Amino acid sequence: MTLLREIYHCSVCGNVVEVVNEQAGELKCCEKPMNKLSAKKEDAGQEKHVPVVEETNGCIKVKVGSLEHPMLKEHHIKFIEVLTADQVHRAELKPGQKPEAKFCVKKSDVVEVREWCNVHGLWKV
Ligand SMILES: [Fe+2]
């Protein structure tokens, strides 16, 4: 059973998928059940992952995290998502870019902000 907006990871090949239509079936990849990711909320250690949200002229800017996260090929932020009650906004990032994105969403409409690091997984605020 999947739920809308859940994110799953394949421990074999590294595929990451987001549910856009929840159903009773189980997600499998590489002949194994995929792992549902739970977003962490508190940073521990030197690298910071919890998204920082700033309001800018009716939009928001999201930075990862309180200390800029690395954006190296082997360790980077792959995407940042902003969730409202009925929309999912996603910025896809690449190594070498800054780990931040601007979304024209009112801060008061935001229900969750999350990001996925290719080494350390899913984080939210
Ligand atoms: Fe990381």
Image: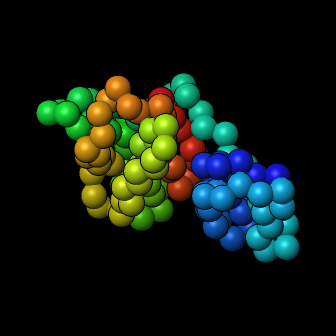
Specify the quadrant of the image occupied by residue 63. top left
Q: Residue at x 29, y 33 (%)?
A: 106
Q: How many labels does the image show?
A: 0
Q: Is 73 in front, or is 88?
A: 88
Q: Is residue 76 above or below residue 111?
A: below
**Where does residue 18 sit, x and y in percent of width and height?**
60, 57
**Where does residue 120 sit, x and y in percent of width and height?**
57, 46
Q: Is 33 in front, or is 3?
A: 3
Residue 12 shows up from this direction? yes
Q: Residue furthest left?
A: 57
* In this picture, residue 58 sits left or right of residue 10: left
* In this picture, residue 10 sits left or right of residue 68: right
* In this picture, residue 1 sits left or right of residue 94: right
Q: Which residue lies furthest to the front in this view?
A: 86
Q: Which residue is drawn at 30% across and 40% down?
A: 105
Q: Residue at x 65, y 65 (%)?
A: 14
Residue 47 shows up from this direction? no
Q: Which residue lies furthest to the bottom in this view?
A: 30
Q: Residue at x 27, y 58 (%)?
A: 97
**Where does residue 122 sit, x and y in percent of width and height?**
57, 44
Q: In this view, does 66 lie above or below 28?
A: above
Q: Which colour scheme is used?
A: rainbow
**Where does residue 20 sit, x and y in percent of width and height?**
60, 58
